[in-house]
Image: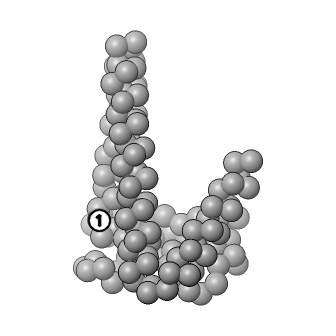
């Protein structure tokens, strides 16, 4: 799927939040929160897994980890007024890249699933979950 050489391990966590994520570079792992199994239909669940494989295929996991470490270190190692602006600029650039990485993984889900409605349902489930958690 998507030219990923290693088949990612798949784990399920006991968590009520509707979410999934991927991590690991040499041996990638996909983690699904248990609530996703209850909330999603089969095609939407397949789209979620394809989305996470898209992150693995594009090496988003590695770049997200590197950017997060850089942002944390820049604020902790040299905390001063002078680093505030560069760190803020770096944070904004990372936020923009992060959103783009999500969109490219959404496209990967659409390519793999060949079911645009399943991908739309997946995104609506996730959006609904995000809104209710942050309301």
For residue 132, say whether it is visible.
yes
Instruction: Give the residue drawn at x 42%, y 62%.
Output: 103
Label 1: which secondary element: loop
On the image, which quarter does residue 132 sit in?
A: bottom right
* Front residue of 54 and 23: 54
Could you tell whether 107 is left or right of 12 in the image? left
- The spot of residue 80 in percent (x, y) is 39, 13
Is residue 9 in view from this perspective?
Answer: no
Quarter of image, res 85? top left
Query: Residue at coordinates 63% horizontally, 61% vertically from top-left?
Result: 127
Q: In which image quadrant can residue 9 be found?
A: bottom left
* 79 sits left or right of 16 in the view: left
Where residue 43 appears, as percent x and y from the top left, is: 56, 86
Task: Name the quarter where the N terminus is drawn.
Answer: bottom left
Q: Determine crowd level at label 1: few under 14, some 14-19, many 20+ residues with C-alpha closer than 10 A.
A: some
- Answer left or right for 25 relative to 121: left
x, y percent for residue 111: 38, 81
Residue matched to label 1: 58
128, above or below 93, in the image: below
Specify whether 36 is left or right of 132. left
Colour scheme: one colour
Please report the residue visible at 33 percent of the width from the left and 24 percent of the height from the top.
86
x, y (%) of residue 90?
Answer: 34, 34
Q: Total label count?
A: 1
The foreground one among 15 and 40 is 40
Residue plotted at (30% across, 70% down) = 57
């Amino acid at each position: 799927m998507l030219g990923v050489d290693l088949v990612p391990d798949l784990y399920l966590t006991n968590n009520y939040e509707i979410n999934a994520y991927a991590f690991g570079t040499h041996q990638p792992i996909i983690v699904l929160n248990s609530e996703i199994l209850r909330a999603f239909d089969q095609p939407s669940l397949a789209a979620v897994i394809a989305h996470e494989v898209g992150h693995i295929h594009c090496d988003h996991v590695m770049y997200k980890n590197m950017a997060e470490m850089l942002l944390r270190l820049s604020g902790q190692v040299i905390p001063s007024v002078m680093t505030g602006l560069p760190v803020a600029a770096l944070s904004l650039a990372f936020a923009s890249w992060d959103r783009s990485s999500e969109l490219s993984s959404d496209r990967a889900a659409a390519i793999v699933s060949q079911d645009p409605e399943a991908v739309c349902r997946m995104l609506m489930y996730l959006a609904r979950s995000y809104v209710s958690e942050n309301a």
